[in-house]
Every structure is written in C-alpha cells, then in structure tokens.
Amino acid sequence: MESLARLLLLVAAAGCAAGALAATPHPAKGLRVRLTHVDAHGNYSRLQLLQRAARRSHHRMSRLVARATGVPMSSKAVASGSGGDLQVPVHAGNGEFLMDVAIGTPALPYAAIVDTGSDLVWTQCKPCVECFNQSTPVFDPSSSSTYAPVPCASDLCGDLPTSSCTSASRCGYAYTYGDASSTRGVLATETFTLAKSELPGVAFGCGDTNEGDGFSQGAGLVGLGRGPLSLVSQLGLDKFSYCLTSLDDTGKSPLLLGSAAGIAESAATAPAQSTPLVKNPSQPSFYYVTLTGLTVGSARITLPSSAFAIQDDGTGGVIVDSGTSITYLEAPGYRALRKAFVAQMSLPVADGSEVGLDLCFQAPAGGVDQVRVPKLVLHFDGGADLDLPAENYMVLDSASGALCLTVMPSRGLSIIGNFQQQNFQFVYDVAKDTLSFAPVQCGKL
C-alpha cells in the first residue's frame, strides 16, 4: 500500500517554469532542450487544472482511437492553392508540453507543441489566409534566406499521408485534428535551431490556413513519432528521451535528443528496465509496447493475451504517449483494474464527473496523510515492470475532497499517459526498437 502524504494536489501544474533552450557545449554529444507544461502560466485553480487535463486527454484519446480504428472523420480541405479537394485523415494533434525552437535565417523563435503521437513538424506562416493567435511573430518565408518549398515530385512530398500539387507545382498538405483544429499549407525545408545548434534542411509544414484553439500556447507542432517526416527520423536520431517532472515541481522537463538520451544512471533511483517497441503497420507513427498484465495491491490481474494485443485489423495495442495525461485501457482491462481498486480501497466511491474522471473516492475530512492506496504496477514484455508511486496514478482535488484514479476506459486503443510517466526517464531507442525507463530525479538531468 502506498502512503498519500506526498499525493499530488495539482497546485503547481501552473508552476512549471517557462521553457528555454539549454545550450549543450558539445552538440555532437546530443541536444538538450527544456519542456514547459501548456498550463504553466494559466493561473488556474486546482480543479480547473485537473478538468483541463482530463478534457484534453479525452479529446486526444478520441482522435487517437479514431485514427487507430479507421473511423471516418474526414473533412474537405483545400491545400493552399491546390484547387482540389483532399480527404484529410485524422491525426493526433495537441499535446501537454511545449518546446522552444527557432526557424529560418535569421532565426525566428517560437514555441511548439511536442508530440510523440504524430510526425509532421509545422508552424504558421505568412501570408495568413487564416491563422490563430500566437504569442510570437508568425514566420514569414520571404524573410528567410534558407526557406525552400518542396516540389510535388519530391520524396518528401510522397511521405505525407495525403498531399496535393499547387498551381506552382509545390507540395500541398492538409492535417485535421478532429476537434475543428487543422493546418493547411505547403511543405518546405528550412533551417531549424535547437539548443543553439543549427539543423539545416528540415522538412516542415508552412501553414497559411490554421484553425481551432486546440494548439494551446504553441505556434505549431514538432512531431516525434516513428514516421519519415518526424524530427526524430529527419535528424537520423538513434534515440531520444524525456523526464517529465511532477506537476507540483517548478523545474523544467528535459528532452534529450541523440547520444545524450541514455538513462542517467547517476540520477536514477532504481535500475533501468527495457521492453521491446512493437511496430503496427497500420499505425507506423505510434510507439507500441506489449502490456502483459497489471497488479493492483496484492492482486495480479489475469487477462487473456488478446486483451491488449494489436489485432489483425490494426486496432488494439498499447502506445506510450507524451501528449495524453491520463492512461486509457481497453474496457476489459479497465473494468478489472477498477474492480480491484474498489475492493482494496477503504474509502467510499465518490462522483468524479465534475473532475472528468471515472473512479473517485471521498477523502476523509481529516486529510489524506493516513490514507493508503493499493500499489499499481504495469507489466510489460521482457519482464519490465513500471512500479508507480501513488502520485502517478491518484490525484486529489482538495476543494471537493475527491481522490481520483487517473486511468479511464477506452475502446480500440490503450494509451500510457504522461501522469504515469512523471519522474521517470523514458528512452525511446528507435535503432534497437526498445523502450527503457527508470525512476529519475528529473531536476538532475
């Protein structure tokens, strides 16, 4: 059983400090950038922070499931100047963390959403047909000496899931995110700057028609997925990692790219564990793992091997995702998990609808210092066990006294969310197809 004396109170998701590029003195050894939570400067109440995270997670889960299950959520979209209609697939979009990047020559800084569930790197571009508000100037391609549009016949254009050819023979793209958010424009190459290191020739979407408020504080998105247009693939990185700090921690969350991304053994509080990354041909961008079981307290939950397996039609499976806060499990697995928590908790079940979570308990009036909750362990292929501290799966709304489990049911896809990942370093080794993790003091990275 796990003591809740240190339980996360969701006070300081707003306290995550502003992200800033942290220069590495030896770029050849890898790049280091800092991530900022999207609600870091919103001055939200505790309840609002939890509600916002739950709402974003629900929308993102719906988009990810729609993408994985092939639910038809297409929309008519005309790529800039194409003169034709595109049937636009649904992409993940959104996210919980921002990174500072700069684009062009001279370099123009902006904040971008980091997304392990998608590939395209994009930002808003002038001249805007329609652009949402952003805190930094919109990128003007005509002001950069290194901007180059991608022609329709380019292999890069062929890497897009859908594309069109503009009247000027430029590669047009269109992405929609299923919640009225979308970006359209042309694919181009440009010099990006990360941690004071210039990265020439990065392909990105130069969006002149961008709609919706789903991009939070970002002026675009940096995809870190497994597809050919992601930043990871374009830079030829063998691995990357991140360590997401607790929401009550004012420190930044480090993102490490390339050779700097290995487990920081000096900061780890337990040995690293590894599990294979699994590829799903139907969804090549996602980082799938094999979840073999769950333990709640003293009870090992036994489920058929098919419960979390990738199905023949490409549905199912379990992905690790930085942009979803809450963990979602396929309904049979979730029901068994929920039943185990209800049986082992010594508190009455409470209504979690106001918070936006399914299973909540009423905390005692005297506080949660003496409350103990069952341990939660996720078991993965290869013998890797993600043994979670209580603050990684239970949250307390001090105003209502609701103590809530940050796991929800889903259908068609399971997602390991970032609440469960906090204060662990996760290393995505794309060269060796492994995911490694260890509990780490993120502030020491």
Image (tube, rainbow, N blue to C red):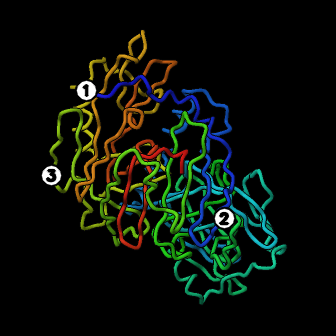
Query: Helix or strand or loop: what does disc 1 sit on?
Result: helix
Give amino acid for label 1.
Val
Q: Is residue 90 visible?
A: no
Q: Quadrant of residue 342?
A: top left
Give the amino acid at mark 2. Answer: Pro
Depicted 211 relative to depicted 233: above or below: above
- Indicate left or right for 106 with 414 as reference: right
Q: Identify the residue under disc 1.
A: 342
- Amino acid type indicated by mark 3: Pro
In this view, 318 is above or below 432 = above
SS class, disc 3: loop
Residue beneath the point at 51% across and 68% down? 259
Which numbered tag is attached to residue 304? 3
Task: Work out whether mark 2 precedes mark 3 in sequence or the reverse, and give the earlier one.
Answer: 2
Q: Residue at x 46, y 48 (%)?
A: 267
Q: x%, y% of residue 157?
A: 58, 82
| Relative to 1, residue 126 above or below | below
The 10 Å Cα crowd at callout 1, few under 14, some 14 to 19, many 20 or more, is some
Mark 2 → mark 3, Cα distance in angstroms: 50 Å
- State how far apart marks 3 and 1 are (Cα): 22 Å
Q: Name the residue that disc number 2 marks.
A: 25
